[in-house]
Image (spheres, rainbow, N blue to C red):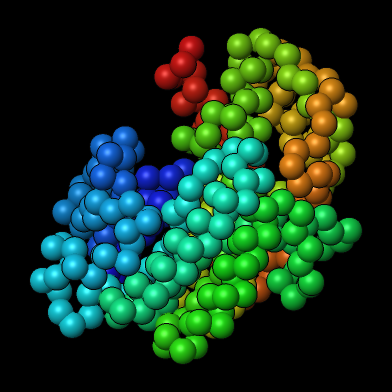
Amino acid sequence: MRVIVTGATSFIGKAVTKELLAGGHHVFAVVRPDSPGRSRLEMLAGEQRENLTFLPFALKDIGKLESCPELCPIPPKKADLWLHLGGEGAGSANRQDPQVQARNIGYALDSLHTAARLGCTRFLFSGSQAEYGIVDGVMGEGIVCHPVSEYGKDKLEVCRRAQQAAGALGIDYVHARIFSVYGPEDHPWSLVSTCLDTFLKEGRMELGACTQQWNFLHVRDAARALTGLLLAKVPAGVYNVAGDDTRPLKSYIEQMHRLCGGKGSYEYGKRPPNAEGVVSLVPDTGKLKEAAGFAQEISFEDGIREMIGMYKENCL
């Protein structure tokens, strides 16, 4: 399969690209012309480098992809599948910026239309658990969403508008609501990265109450789930992408502290909630498992042990 991936140099994008290449697919990675992550992606591709083609386009120019020289020699169907992980802005401030998020809606819908013109039969968009908002109970794909942040509102708006457009375009639209993903090469300000860095340096973590339910999924498992939804003949629609291990966030914090040898310290109740407020993550993953045959393979303990090993090798 010929797969176009936007956001290929992102945290999840790198893992997805590597998973697709390992499966023998050709990945057309859409990257900014000045992207600093290109060399890292080339290195991760390893022996499958010949099946990785870079398309140097900014998201604002995604509609020009049809005339890209790398795609022009492949008539009449230039690509089979499109995985949209690209977007502007990272961090809490950008998640609440309506202008940033409005641009991301435009990029996603432009990408959907471009995918259809290129002959793609399936378009997968990376949505978010933030679409649900604050839910007292299980987050199933069929419940009514009440997003709080601009990020969640605009992800939900993409879902609404893309589902309406997809039928007329003749393309299957899959909307993956991704929950909390962790793993090597995550943003240094993520909760897991910050905890491990602080504990291993014998520092002190100031945290919120951490009493809410949480769910972590390793990035390689997330990549398998996303590629499964993209490649399998699953029905179009919304799918939660999350793991099996749902428990109080405190439990995860204390497990990381233990795996770091009890170094450093932590204190609860010292930080205010983030932009979305106090959110509990209790995902229903039954639909994903049934449709794509997904099963989590990497436990949180194994994933954290891997990250600690890499951190000690590279940072200490």
Q: Nearer the viewer, residue 168 or 126?
A: 168
- Residue located at (18% from left, 82% from top): 76
Q: Nearer the viewer, residue 128 or 293?
A: 128
72 with respect to 295 (left or right): left
- Residue with the most extreme left position: 73
Tell me where residue 34 sits by quadrant. Answer: top left
Q: How far from the left and from the top, in percent, is residue 192?
A: 63, 32
Say whether residue 228 is visible.
Answer: no
Image quarter hosting the N terminus: bottom left
Say whether residue 309 is visible.
Answer: yes
Tell me where residue 178 sits by quadrant. Answer: bottom right
Above or below 176: residue 267: above
59 with respect to 91 (left or right): left
- Residue with the most extreme front position: 99
Q: How far from the left and from the top, in percent, is residue 115?
A: 35, 73
Above or below 141: residue 273: above
Above or below 16: residue 157: below
Q: How far from the left and from the top, in percent, is residue 21?
A: 30, 57
Tell me where residue 278 sits by quadrant. Answer: top right
- Residue located at (61% from left, 34% from top): 190
